[in-house]
Amino acid sequence: MFHLFHHLLYIASHKDSRWKGIEIKRGQAITGLNALRKNTGISVRSLRTCLNRLKSTSEVTIKTTNRYSIITICNYDKYNSLIGDTDTVNDTLADTQTTNKRQTNDNIQELREDKKVEKLRMKKAEILKKQIEEDNLIREKETEMFIENLLSGKY
């Protein structure tokens, strides 16, 4: 994802301009999945995943047509003003990547905990079912013994 975001920063327009009669604002890039695949070496499937993640973290917005996509880098000025300071750009991008990983790890942890809770519930249900079956067997035997005793005249 870092590689893709870095590439988007690189290809984004540095000033307002026009392309085929379309206004392109500072921080926007016109591209498509095939062009991104060709220029970054990232598979189309991974590109879709990365772009969705960048959208979900509000790093980019994407307007898609049947011929191209206009990708707008949110806070482009923040990143562009840092271009002279490579360490700061890398730190900012690394922080974003770390945050995204942390969010993903948190989601995975929540899923694992949900699965553990579900397994515990299933075990409890199985135990309760066995206890009920055992109680029913005991009641049946007690009922049979009562009926036998009643019929034999012990009561």
Image: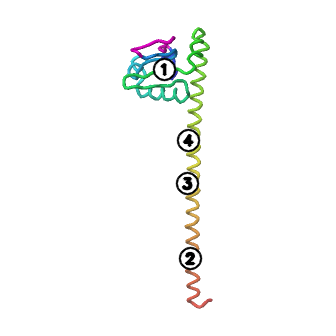
Q: What's the residue type where badge 4 is placed?
A: Leu
Residue drawn at (41%, 24%) of the image: 43
Mark 3 vs mark 2, foreground winner is: 3
Q: Which residues are magenta?
A: 10-21
Which label sits on residue 35?
none
Q: Earlier in the sequence, mark 1 or mark 3?
A: 1
Q: SS class of the residue under badge 1?
A: helix
Q: Element type at marker 2? A: helix
Q: What distance separates the C-alpha of mark 4 from that of mark 1? A: 28 Å
Disc 3: which residue: 122
Residue 20: in magenta span: yes
The span from disc 1 to disc 3 (Cα, nearest Å) is 43 Å
Residue in front for this viewpoint, 53 or 136: 53
Q: Position of residue 148 (x, y in %)?
A: 56, 85
**Classed neighbour count for the residue bearing mark 2: other residues with Cα under 10 Å, few (<14), some (14–19), many (≥20):** few
Three-letter amino acid code at the position of disc 2: Lys
Q: Which residue is mark 2?
A: 141
Label 3 is placed on what type of residue? Answer: Met
Camera-nearest label, 4 or 1: 1
What residue is shown at x 56% (from left), y 50% (from top)?
A: 119
First reached walking from the N terminus: tag 3 or tag 4: 4
Q: Which mark is residue 111?
A: 4
Q: Earlier along the polypeptide chain: callout 4 or callout 1? A: 1
Residue located at (58% from left, 61% from top): 128
Label 3 to label 2: alpha-carbon separation: 29 Å
Residue in view at x 55 percent, y 27 percent: 58
**Residue under numbered circle 1:** 4
Q: Label 4: state its secondary structure.
A: helix
Q: CA distance from mark 1 to mark 2?
A: 72 Å
